[in-house]
Image (tube, helix red, strand yellow):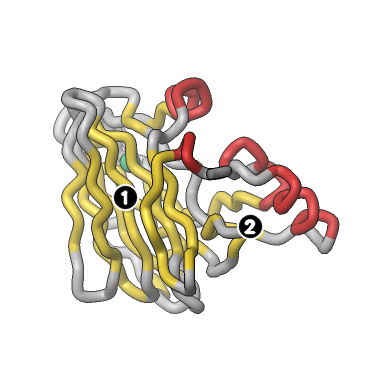
Amino acid sequence: MPLPPSELRYLSSDASIEGVVSNERWLSGLRDSFVDQAAFDAALSAGDVMVYRVASVESANGEGQLHYGLGLLMPGKIGKEYFHTRGHIHAFRPAAEVYICLQGQGLMLLEHESDGSYEVVEMTPDRVIYVPGYTTHQTINTGTEPLTYWGVLSSQAGHDYEFVKVNGFRHLIVEENGKPVVINREDFWK
Ligand SMILES: [Fe+2]
């Protein structure tokens, strides 16, 4: 079974890992992630941009093994909605994850599917976040510089994006009076 090298070099400012190709997500592929479709169309007509990318190290697989990745989420907004990742829940629902923020200012939305509760936690370079199993999670950049972070999780976790596509998040973080606020998604147009 191939294992990753025992050490890899990375650049936190660029969120790149030596020898690892990043997977990029561009605005044009993220229409479903934003509520305000008019603002989305206006932004896209001004030009497609890369919203986030992740360099993932996933060569070790099987029981006890780990996957890890270095993410970079650009600053920006679509109307009142901050740039964010699509978000996901782990395909293997019990799998937890640890996020370690390296740079920038952001939030993580955690929606616990087991009891319907949710949390919004800050992402700053002095914070580490534990995402338990059975939790849909999304990263939001509320700052003015790229938000970079490590994610470390079980190799068995997998990413279920379809769950978010079908069910969506119940909450949304938008800018009001220059600050991020959490609203119920269905209250967006009120
Ligand atoms: Fe995850």
Q: Position of residue 137 (x, y in %)?
A: 33, 42
Q: Position of residue 62 (x, y in %)?
A: 24, 28
- Judging by the rendered image, the residue that carries numbered circle 1 is 68
Q: Position of residue 163 (x, y in %)?
A: 43, 23
Disc 1 residue type (three-letter) = Tyr
Label 1 SS: strand
Q: Residue at x 41, y 64 (%)?
A: 180
Q: Nearer the viewer, residue 33 or 117?
A: 117
Q: Nearer the viewer, mark 2 or mark 1?
A: 2
In the orientation shown, which residue stands out farthest toward the front?
190
Q: Residue at x 15, y 34 (%)?
A: 64
Give the alpha-carbon distance from disc 2 to disc 1, as whole Å: 29 Å
- Judging by the rendered image, the residue that carries numbered circle 2 is 78
Q: Residue at x 75, y 58 (%)?
A: 43
Q: Quadrant of residue 113?
A: top left
Q: Nearer the viewer, residue 141 or 115?
A: 115
Q: Nearer the viewer, residue 131 or 180?
A: 180
Residue 153: assigned label: none
Work out whether residue 4 can be spotted: no
Write down which quadrant ligand 1 falls in.
top left
Label 2 SS: strand
